[in-house]
Amino acid sequence: MAFADHLARVSGSYNLPSILFCSMSDPLAQLASFLARAERLLDRLEPLLPPAERVPDWSAAHAFRWRSANGSGYLQAIRRLPQIRLADLRDIDEQKARLESNTRQFIAGLPANNVLLTGARGSGKSSLIKALLNEYARQGLRVIEVEKAELTDLPQIVELLDERPERFIIFCDDLSFESGDARYKALKVVLDGSFAAAPENVLIYATSNRRHLMPEYFAENLESRRVGEEIHPGEAVEEKISLSERFGLWISFYPFDQEAYLDIVAHWLRSFGCRPDEVAGSERAALNFAVERGSRSGRVAWQFARDWAGHQQSRGASAAPVLPASSSKRARSRS
């Protein structure tokens, strides 16, 4: 009876008894009328039904991006990945070794930690995760990229990955939260805050410019109290620290000095096909480029190398002699 009342409310002006108990004087006409009314009724009921789940094609890619709309989400394959290698990441050997070791443990089914990579912008945090995927995709490693705006979908994403044979890293790039942002609670629950255990084939790797992921204000330190010789932070500070503490491994990245910056520039220039003399002649321009950008980061070094190599190759191409069509034909005939 309750279901019939619900249908009556949804159907609005439709007379359900007339639909369900039509007369048989003209069976075909009544049947056509019934089907038309039923179709209109189903159209009105459709928004109340849960959306159909989109099953991802796991063979389509090694990396996926979570997309959500209208209350439902799905995994979108990322078919073109940056072809960056671990060997391309210079002067972060310690950070690279720690993250690679944790990832190798994870792939092998051994205990491994969720990881928070923090520090200077452009120092290789995100590139390191991309390089690890390129290195270990054949061994079953996969990456799911989740934007901050969609962190509330993390429980749904984790459930989707459960019982898959692959090993998944959920990648949250440039992660930080403002005061009052409730999305960090969804991340806390997935990391370590729910009775439901996280699947063994899922880890979270996040990058951030902040160690504690949330802004800290001077006034919050006034809540701290002294107990004997110990200082106990206030509740606001404890809440902010509690999120980053749920990452078992913290890896810090630091700004590059001039020597490291020039080493990265030289590496990328060689990879772009520059000659040794072109690499040696680029140092002053590379330093000026860094001053203009206000940073000696790995990203700035890569951007300079692309600019410099492009100019050198363009200059070489314009200097090469171009034979007229008739001359080139005579040259081929003589050969």
Image (cartoon, rainbow, N blue to C red):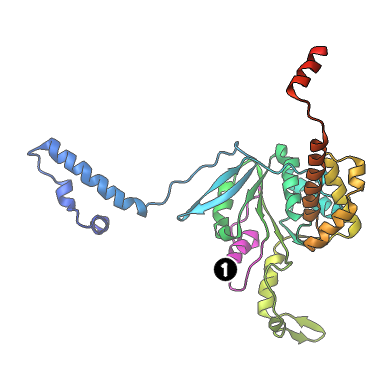
**Residue at label 1?**
182
In the displayed structure, would residue 45 be above or below residue 328?
A: below
Q: Name the residue: 26% across, 50% down.
A: 41
Q: Name the residue: 67% across, 70% down.
A: 214
Q: Secondary structure at mark 1?
A: loop
Residue 162 at x, y = what percent?
Answer: 59, 47
Residue 160 at x, y = what percent?
Answer: 56, 48
Q: Is residue 254 visible?
A: no
Q: Is residue 21 visible?
A: yes
The answer to which of 308 and 31 lies nearer the viewer is 308
Amino acid carrying mark 1 in the image: Ala
**Screen quadrant of the N terminus:** bottom left
Q: Is residue 190 magenta?
A: yes
**Screen quadrant of the C terminus:** top right
Residue 21 at x, y = what percent?
Answer: 14, 46
**For residue 247, which quarter of the picture?**
bottom right
**Residue 215 falls left or right of residue 97:** left
**For residue 326, which quarter of the picture?**
top right
